[in-house]
Amino acid sequence: MYRYLFSFLIQLIRDIYGVCFRILHFKNTTLLPTFRTL
């Protein structure tokens, strides 16, 4: 039971990190060209 819960928490944390990384990467790729035009 504890092992299942632990693996579930690790998977959840990895998913959250993946989403945050995608959002940051998306913001960086969209913000950089606008700064270059300014």
Image (cartoon, rainbow, N blue to C red):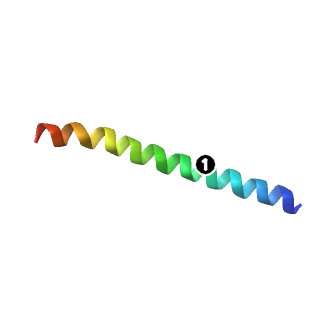
Q: Residues within 10 Å of mark 1 (few under 14, many from 20)?
A: few
**Which quarter of the rendering shows the N terminus?**
bottom right
Q: Is residue 5 above or below residue 29?
A: below
Q: Which residue is at a point 78% across and 59% down the rendered structure image?
A: 6
**Which quarter of the rendering shows the C terminus?**
top left
Label 1 sits on residue: 15
Q: Which residue is at a point 33% across and 43% down the rendered structure image?
A: 28
Q: Is residue 1 above or below residue 15?
A: below
Label 1: which secondary element = helix
Q: Amino acid at mark 1?
A: Asp
Left or right, 7 with respect to 19, comes to: right
Left or right, 3 with respect to 37, comes to: right
Q: Position of residue 23 (x, y in %)?
A: 42, 46
Q: Position of residue 17 (x, y in %)?
A: 55, 51
Q: Position of residue 16 (x, y in %)?
A: 57, 53
List the single residue furthest toward the bottom: 2
Q: Which residue is at a point 84% across and 55% down the rendered structure image?
A: 4
Left or right, 23 with respect to 30, comes to: right
Q: Which residue is at a point 40% across and 48% down the rendered structure image?
A: 24
List the single residue furthest toward the left: 38
Total marks placed: 1
Left or right, 35 with respect to 19, comes to: left
Q: Is residue 20 above or below residue 5?
A: above
Q: Quadrant of residue 5?
A: bottom right
Q: Position of residue 32 (x, y in %)?
A: 24, 40
